[in-house]
Amino acid sequence: MNTALLRLLQLSDPTLPIGGYAHSAGLETYVQAGVVHDAATARAFITEMLSRNLFYTDAALVSLAFDAATHNDLNELLQLDDECTAVKLPREMRQASQKLGMRLLKIFQPLCSSLLADQYRNAIRAQQATGHYCLLFGIYASVLQIPKTDALTGFYYNAAVGMVTNSVKLIPLGQQDGQEILFSFQQLIQELTEQTLNPNRSCIGLCCPGFDIRSMQHERLYSRLYMS
């Protein structure tokens, strides 16, 4: 039996109790503004989020955190933590990343021993680091000996599932629509994964400002179902 696959399934499980269901990453604002209103616009939104936002931010940082964990490089990890905080301009997105990260740490810290994860936790407690979800995902993927390609595939898939689920709830869409949208992303996720194996460090933070603006506007929506 492939235990690495089982570990990846648990790490990337959309139902992992870290609170991901409470965040829409700005989608709620797009829906209320009428920009995302059907299956086609939902697919377009998720495509842009995966390829124009996550590709240059969280996914790239997962890849780099995986490498830092493989080399047990705490200094590199702390620098990545600072960069991740800096590129998340909306307050809600920074808070969401930290909340998800701390819950992921709470789940996996007792399950697998990692000196680097312990050092990172201590840095967070000392307020020397924030504790971002993408970085902890990369750390634990390395610690659990999940191949990097599989880890990145799982990360992109987890993000896609979350956005599809939110689209079904918010627009709303039928469950069949949601599954067809998710199925259509297989080739895109494969391509993004291959490109993220060796991310361009100088491009981190290069993303569409519209996503940040909508996330900032989310803080002042008259009614909200999601925390971000």
Image (tube, rainbow, N blue to C red):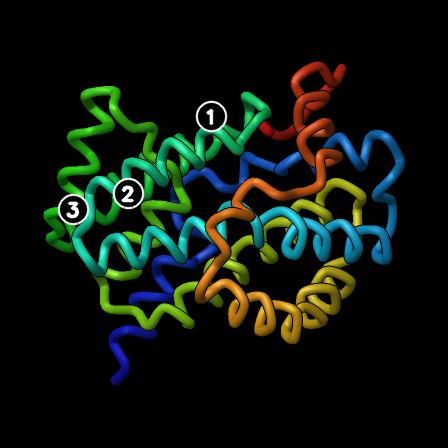
What residue is rendered at 64% in x and 49% in y? 163
How far across and how far down the image is residue 159, in percent?
A: 55, 53
How far across and how far down the image is residue 93, in percent?
A: 54, 30
Q: Amino acid at mark 1?
A: Gln
Compare marks 1 and 3 and give the one earlier in the sequence: 1
Compare marks 2 and 1 and give the one earlier in the sequence: 2
What residue is rendered at 51% in x and 47% in y? 202
Residue marked by disc 3: 116
Q: Amino acid at mark 2?
A: Leu
Q: Tell me if label 3 and label 2 are in contact, CB under 8 Å.
A: yes
Residue marked by disc 2: 77
Q: Is residue 154 above or below residue 122?
A: below
Question: Which one is closest to the eye, mark 1 or mark 3?
Answer: 3
Question: Which one is closest to the eye, mark 2 or mark 1?
Answer: 2
How far across and how far down the image is residue 97, in percent?
A: 45, 35
Q: Residue furthest front?
A: 202
Q: Amino acid at mark 3?
A: Leu
Residue marked by disc 1: 95
In the depicted view, which residue is nearer to us: 215 or 65? 65
Circle 3 SS class: helix
Report how far apart the C-alphas of labels 2 and 1 lie in the structure.
19 Å
Location of the C terminus (image quadrant): top right
For label 3, the crowd category at 10 Å Cα-Cα, with few meaning under 14, some 14 to 19 and many 20 or more, is many
Q: Quadrant of residue 1?
A: bottom left
In the depicted view, which residue is nearer to us: 15 or 74? 74
How far across and how far down the image is residue 108, in percent?
A: 23, 49
Circle 1 SS class: helix
Circle 2 SS class: helix
